[in-house]
Amino acid sequence: MQLIDKLILFNRFLRFNKLHNIDFSATIYQSKAHFTDQSRVWKDKGLYNEIDSLLTNMEETTNKYNHTLSKINDRIETLLRKEEIDIIRRDYDNFEELYPDLELQKQRQVALDNEFVQELKTDIGNFSDWRYAGLELNPSNGVMTNSLLSSDPMYVYTGNVADKDSIKSNFNSFFAEKRLMFYDNLQDLPIGQLGIITSILSFNFWPMDPIKDTLKQVYELLKPGGHFIFTYNDCEYEPQIDMCNGFASYNTATVMSGLAEMYGFDVIKKRCVRDTHSWMVVKKPGELTSNKLSGPLVEIKDKI
């Protein structure tokens, strides 16, 4: 059996098994109390004692069932973790061998679901604000850049893959030349001054170490109360495990939540569209504050 097939199968088993844990404890407790109370009016309590014994046996059998099911799940979890290690190692090899160029990024964007794009843009728009600066990491050709339109100033990190001309073409000439600020080095950006940062279609293809490095850098760049929105490949959904077959990297919501919290973030929301596209919103603890009294007037260029 292929590695991806094993991961899909083990995840399917666990998801199914978690639906079949049995808990009758409350019902058994209530039944015992009911029949014990009722038995008090009878001299011959034989049948009530029999019911009490049956209920006790049911409780013991249920506990034994749940314990056995737990051991099955532990065995599957152990095998799943082993397979995860193998695929994560493969992700590191792929990351070193396949450094993405602009053409590859465009191919990846073609696979994006329209509903996902609109939902993600809405989230980004809801968390961006003219009172705070915004930053887009690795924007490729700028398919999501205008979601940060209200951010002021608006920074674009071009250290990986970015087509500056395509990004600028999403805006009028004034905004493109005066408001968009391109940086090739994150170290040049102001520390602790950003209200929102986004990373779209990067973590989906990265192994853990570069993700950790980015989380650390983002935390330092954000103001207290600032938000970080990123996409990733959540293999707690079966279709996204299948994407690991030569396309995306292996990751899960559990792992990403743990990493975000390890670097100091609070997890605000986890979203998924059609079981195939996942993203997360995390927040640097604190409350956003600003001394700005008004926002700039800008116009987005009409799209065909």
Image (cartoon, rainbow, N blue to C red):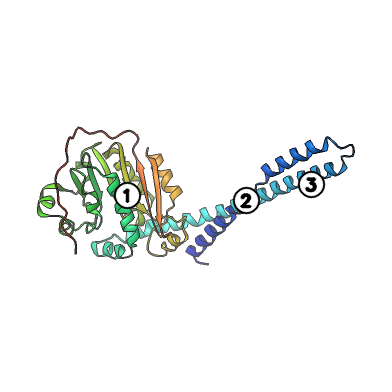
Q: Is residue 132 above or below residue 204?
A: above
Q: Residues within 10 Å of mark 3 (few under 14, many from 20)?
A: some
User: Pointer 3 and pointer 1: residues touching (CB < 8 Å)?
Assistant: no
Q: Residue at x 54, y 59 (%)?
A: 10
Q: Closer to the N terminus: mark 1 or mark 2?
A: 2
Nearer-N-terminus badge (3/2): 2
Q: Which residue is mark 1?
A: 123
Hey, what amino acid is under mark 2? Asn
Residue 88: x, y in percent?
43, 55
Please rate how many residues cluster around mark 1, counting C-alpha atoms within 10 Å: few if below 14, some from 14 to 19, many from 20. some
Give the residue furthest to the front: 41
Q: Position of residue 191 (x, y in %)?
A: 24, 37
Q: Against 191, is 83 above or below?
A: below
| Pointer 2 local density, CA inside 10 Å: few below 14, some 14–19, many at least 20 | some
Q: How many marks?
A: 3
Report which quarter residue 278 is drawn in. bottom left
Which residue in the protein does label 2 denote?
21
